[in-house]
Image: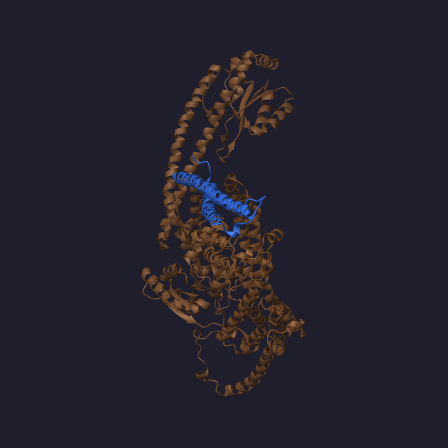
Chain colours: A blue, B brown
Amino acid sequence: MACCGPKLSLCGLIISAWGIVQLALMGVFYYIEAVALAEDLPEVHSYETLDDFYSQMTRGYQQNAYNCWIAALLYLITMAISAHQFWLNNRSSLSV
Amino acid sequence: MGSLFRSAEMTLCQLFLQSEAAYACVSELGELGLVQFRDLNPDVNVFQRKFVNEVRRCDEMERKLRYLEKEIKKDGIPMLDTGENPEAPQPREMIDLEATFEKLENELREVNQNAEALKKNFLELTELKQILRKTQVFFDEHEGGTNPTESMTRALISEDAIARQSGPVQLGFSEKHYDPEEYYPCFVAGVILRERIPAFERMLWRACRGNVFLRQAEIETPLEDPSTGDQVYKSVFIIFFQGDQLKTRVKKICEGFRATLYPCPEAPADRREMAMGVMTRIEDLNTVLGQTQDHRHRVLVAAAKNIKNWFVKVRKIKAIYHTLNLFNLDVTQKCLIAECWVPVLDLENIQLALRRGTERSGSSVPPILNRMDTPEDPPTYNHTNKFTSGFQVLYDAYGIASYREMNPTPYTIITFPFLFAVMFGDLGHGSLMTVFAAWMVLKEKPLQAQKSDNEIWNIFFGGRYIILLMGLFSMYTGLIYNDAFGKSLNIFGSSWRVSNYNYNYTQSVTDIMLDPASEDYIGYPYPLGMDPVWQLSKNKIIFQNSFKMKISIILGVTHMLFGVAISFFNHTYFKNRLSIICEFIPQVIFLVALFFYMVILMFIKWTKYYATLTDTPLGPRCAPSVLISFINMVLVKDTPYEAVCETPYMYAGQGGIQMFLLLCAFVCIPWILLAKPIMIMRSRKETSQYSVTHNQLNSATENGDAEQPIHNNTSQPPAAAHGGDGHDEEPMGEIFIHQGIHTIEYVLGSVSHTASYLRLWALSLAHSQLSEVLWSMVLNKGLTVDGWTGGVALYIIFTIWASLTVSILVLMEGLSAFLHTLRLHWVEFCTKFYSGNGYAFQPFSFELILDSASQSKEE
């Protein structure tokens, strides 16, 4: 059943392909705790000692790495749906 | 070899074609597409030309084909486009084609007429059916007679009226014509357009003073109007009245409102019978209609197979006759004479094509191709391929190069994407662009075959190689700027260490500045481009601005010097020594003495001063501002300096050298302004004196033809038409004025153009700032969500960020960077050497003609 038009499904395909590549890479960068991404972490509110701060930061990096991979997975699903829709649209347009 | 850097060498040729062979030869030349014919009878009216009849026949055929195509499109039958390119048919085949098209058109017209008549019939029957059905309701109500109006109507219908109506009832629409006068009906029934009902009702009421009674009901399903094919909504009405006078009046009103009246029997049994009859007739009609449609479909499908082919053939014939119309007939009427521009290198191919044409026509006399001498400027023809054509278009849009002028396209292939990338430096955005362009390049053939009529898409597709290079170069500059979507990549490890920050320091300082004098810098730079740590420092923009501004000026001065250097090749090619001495040399000196010297100062400043050597003459406080040094050099002023530095200069003897350079530059201005006009004036005086004496000499040996130089047009560039020697007819005053304008343009231009290259820095700054802002304002919001919901938030926000990135940063910023690059090439680069006074070579080519024909059709 085709519920997206040809344009929407194509758009979904492109965005999800991009999303998968970029978010997977960003996940890796968070995982290795890249300094450039330090600004893009959940805020650390209160901490007692430096070690506490470091552990919170590390947790933030880990969390964001997983979040990036989750989003990448969601895009994988989006890609599968869009690809299916795209295929359906193509087939129906050919059969007419 | 010369074809890449200059336009192709052209020559004017005279072509003698035998009348029988002319058609075949021109057809071969059209396939080749390398010959531009000149109109030899420009003063002859279009209608008085020789082959006007044939052209008219082709027009007629084209009209028929267009009619066929319209019908095919109406039925939604796919037209087979095999992409094959049939040769132009022989003239005798034209009659066959004409007959085929005539037959097809007539058949189609007949079918269409029949279908229309049948549809009209069908409409009438459907309307009648609806009347019978709807009036049934009226009559039923009337039988019930519950409301007072109904009973009044009943009273109005007299008994004998019903009795008189018992005449024979015919079925079908033909019945409509029978005269109802003799039956004395007291009602009429019909069908009218729904939107006319209110006016119709009012009119009836007023004209008949309220003595008629109208009932109406809407027909739910729309009916098809057979003449226009539109779907229209109609209503059934029935009017009750009394008396003949009223009847005529009602009928006239009905006529006026274009209502169709149908006979409707009074008795229910008759009505039922009639309805049955109508139903059977509708069914019969439906089968006939279906068969007509089938027939039409078959005819169109058969035509659709060939229609593209036919179009190509007819257009080719038409183009050939149009071309033949440009030719001259010679006195004996035995042969046609044509004049044409041809590229010298392709003369062989043209000869071959002509020979093929002669063989095909079976003529024994070969065509004669004669080179001619002409004082006229030949057209400019640049050989391009699919890769260079995009870049060539950029310059053709500015102005077609003069004949044999240096063509800047080959250099632009590198400079254009490079200058673009300086403004658009971002690894991420560059790779998006590259992926898009690479897709277009890889899928070139299928995309080309689609022939989209979307203008914007065609622009992108036409420039696919430009976009690909722009994308690749942006990826490179993005790597150098260390920018990917506004973030830096730390590939080789930063050259900065943060070691001595304690807890309290980090608590108190929110932004960290990078200072190369401190111990944070480990002494050797990051291997490739910018250090990634700049992304997190506060003084990033200050550092990058000074760096990028200097880079822009260095690139700009190099680019302009390169443009001036190209003008040297123009002058040598056109053997214009005067311009080399009086224009090229002072121009180079002016540019080098002022602006290239500034570039050298930048390099000295970069290499000589160290941040660590504070309180010495080589310390950071002593590095003079390049701009201020330059301004003071031009204004001949002293630069103030601190005591520590000992001197305002970067190297020994700088003051003297600067003075010397300034003098050189100022000497150049009168040199450019006056030298050339004065030289021209002098040489004119000499030649006038010389020619007087020469004429006296000549009169003695008037018959000595051998002394005349033999003109070999092709091997000698037409120097006379270009450059300084071309001012022959111009009065001296104008030469002075032109040279004055030229000088002012160059001198002031060098200043403003150098400043203009600062746009490289400005756009690059804007781009990196915008991408950084977009990241921190949009994507950052998704990344800072705490916990596992962050994944979903990121999923949504990434889509928003991605679409904004594409629309604003890649499309809009890309377009603006593209336009600025174009301007830098057109204004700053081209004005140094490009005159652009040529006109384009427009060969007679079937390919071009067919392309433009199919383009104009789609519009």
Q: Is residue B504 above or below residue B339?
A: above
Give whichever of B518, B180 is nearer the camera: B518
Q: Residue A31: image x %, image y %?
A: 47, 47
On the image, the x and y values in percent for residue B499 come to 55, 57
- Which residue is nearer to you in this view: B782 or B235? B782
Q: Residue at 48% of width from left, 27% of height from top? A: B124
Q: How many labels does the image show?
A: 0
Q: Looking at the image, which is closer to me, B329 or B394? A: B394
Task: Say which quadrant the C terminus of chain A sits in.
Answer: top left
Residue sitting nearer the eye, B204 or B777? B777
Using residue B106 as the reference point, say whether residue B202 is left or right of it: right
Q: Residue at x 50, y 34 (%)?
A: B230
Residue B742: image x %, image y %? 60, 71
Write down the quadrant of residue B31 in the picture.
Answer: bottom left
| Rendered view: B308 above or below B226 | below
| Residue A30 appears in the picture as rendered | yes
Kindly tell me whether residue B380 is visible in this rendering: no
Q: Is residue B855 above or below residue B573?
A: above
The N terminus of chain A lies in quadrant: top left
On screen, B617 above or below B541?
below
Left or right position of A67 against B682? left
Residue B751 coordinates in the image, percent (x, y): 61, 68
